Image: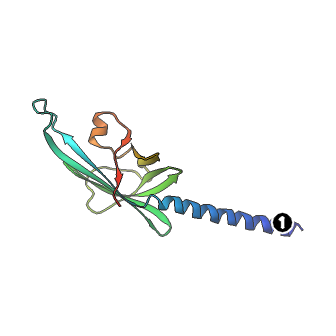
Amino acid sequence: MKKISVGVCALLVVTICLINANKDQSALNDWNGSYRYTEILPAGSSDNPNERYGIIDYNITIYSEDNCYIANIENEGYQTKTNVQAKVIEDENRIDLLFDKYLSGHIWGKYSENELLLSLIREENELYTIWEAIQTNTSLMNNLKIGVYFEKVE
């Protein structure tokens, strides 16, 4: 009788793990796609506050490969070019993007393995960004760590 109970318990544990794995995969599937934010940099001149000296485009592409979720993060523009790959870790309505490796064309930024680059949070109808190792010029100048920046484009 004990052997049957142990076998049933083992089967139950395996079944629960498979259900949780499928639930996690489907939740992460909702994050698949491309996200974009364009930062317009101010000129910093008080003579003409509407003058701009550049833009930086931030792009994140999230996809699944070999049962792992990956994010390619690229920003390019005024005096910058970042091109890295990150691991995607989900926690309910939030994903954390952890540095994995540099991609071809990377010029700006030095990151450590598994360093938190940024997080995205879905709350109501908004997509919030928490800037960590990767930050915008605007967030640095205004000491803003969280805000609505990215929009899903695909």
Q: Position of residue 1 (x, y in %)?
A: 90, 68
* Rendered position, 82 above or below 12: above
Across and down, in percent, residue 54 comes to 17, 46
Q: Residue furthest left?
A: 47
| x 25%, y 60%: residue | 105
Answer left or right for 57 relative to 27. left
Q: Mark 1: which amino acid? A: Ser
Name which residue lies at 34% across and 49% down: 150
Q: Nearer the viewer, residue 60 or 115?
A: 60
- Which image quadrant is residue 14 in? bottom right
Given residues 7 and 112, the one toward you in this image is 7
Instruction: Name the residue tied to disc 1.
Output: 5
Farthest residue, direction top? 46
The one of 10 and 53 positioned closer to us in this rendering: 53
- Please state the horizontal and vertical placement of residue 126, each as a whole percent of the image: 41, 46
Element under disc 1? helix
Q: Residue furthest right?
A: 1
How far across and down, in percent of the image, does residue 27 sit? 52, 58
Left or right of residue 121, residue 73 in this image: left
Q: Is residue 71 above or below residue 112?
A: below
